[in-house]
Amino acid sequence: MTAPAAAARLDDAPLTLPDRPLVSIVIPCLNEERYITALLDALAAQDYGAGGIEVIVADGGSTDRTRELVRAYPSPFARLELVDNPRRITVAGLNEGMKAARGDCWIIIGAHSTVRPDFVRQSVEALKRTGAACVGGPIETIGEGAVGRAIAAAMSSPFGVGNAKFRYASEAGYVDTVPFGCYHRRVWEVVGEFDETVDGADEDSYNARLIEAGGKIWLDPAIRSSYYPRRTLRALARQYREYGAAKGTLFVRGRPLRARHFAPAAMVAGGPALWLLGRVSKPARLALRGLALAYVGLGGFAAYRAAQRHGANPALTFAAMATMHVSYGAGFLEGWWRERARRA
């Protein structure tokens, strides 16, 4: 019997690009009339040249003016196309957009974002220079309003987001994930589609599969973009619960995770457990008090520092950090439990 052919890998051969590759930019969106035109304007102003860029907007059935604005946009691009995303989730939108993409390399950009004029050029140059499968850069979070600025500060602090270097890194190097990554076309051919059974971990999950397939991810501080976060703590809680649930699901499925992915769940599960144990155990009560004081002390100091940098309120910044941690941790446990129950 003939042995089955080995699965293709990203390290089978060097990842090369033409001198001036066509860049596909995929934008999943839903009801983004507030941001979509500004993002298209930023892409049209790229010093790479709009003629070397195609933009595919994957819309999940917007009920505001998003679709109208995209259709009416005076496109300078090689192509501007609006495609439908009937499933209305981000990962499905990415898949629909990539099915329409024709580029030599491709970039994911969230509609709640904008990019610097050299973003595409710096991305392509880094992809060529490093031979990596994916490159990206640090993301600046820009808050709108008092709560939005606090959320931006929390998202830009290592205490808030752990060792997610793309939030604050200033040095180049290999990493486990990047936002708004620029991928070699071969990544799509080898790794395949985004996993539509897990929404909320789209890039992280995909990048983990990329690394498993032999690819590398390079973070370059010259690649700059900005992101507008949620504007209320309630919306932030929903977002981070979704992120956590996705990670909990992936953990049950055997996906490798980092320590930062487990810490919030340990806090959410460990705090009540110590409280219950503390009803009969003095060491447990002391441990809970010590951990609570450490969290408030370290978190308060980190929130103050982050708030200073972003012109935010320190108390609101600490509240945003706590919201992120508790929501993510609860979501992780929910996703873990639901996936285990599904497999039982």
Image: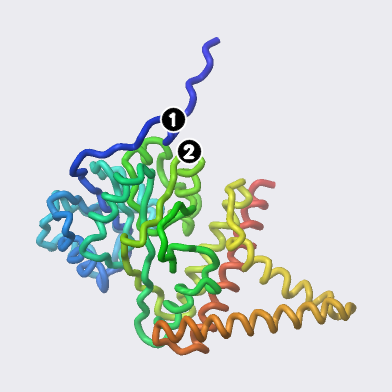
Residue 191: percent from left, percent from top: 43, 39
Outermost residue on the top side: it is: 1
| Type of amino acid under label 2 | Ala
- For disc 1, the marked residue is 8
Do callouts 1 and 2 mark residues in contact (Cβ within 8 Å)?
yes
Q: Quick check: 287 above or below 32?
A: below
Residue 29, visible in the rendered structure: no
What is the number of callouts on the image?
A: 2
Residue 56: percent from left, percent from top: 24, 52
The image quarter containing residue 275 is bottom right
Q: Which mark is residue 157?
A: none
Residue drawn at the location 12% of the way across and 63% of the way down: 72
Please tell me how crowded label 2 is: few (under 14), some (14-19), or many (20+) other residues with Cα within 10 Å. Answer: some
Image quarter where the N terminus lies is top right
Q: Quick check: 191 above or below 170?
A: above
Residue 20: percent from left, percent from top: 18, 44
Q: Nearer the viewer, residue 31 or 289?
A: 289
Residue 200, visible in the rendered structure: yes
Q: First in sequence, mark 1 or 2: give its number.
A: 1
- Image check: 221 left or right of 151? left
Q: Which mark is residue 213?
A: 2
| Type of amino acid under label 1 | Ala
Residue 12: percent from left, percent from top: 42, 30
Identify the secondary structure beneath mark 2: loop
The way the protein has been coloured in the rendering is rainbow
Residue drawn at the location 37% of the way across and 66% of the way down: 139
Identify the secondary structure beneath mark 1: loop
Q: Nearer the viewer, residue 197 or 169?
A: 169
Residue drawn at the location 35% of the way across and 42% of the way down: 131
- Image check: 205 left or right of 193? right
Outermost residue on the front side: it is: 171
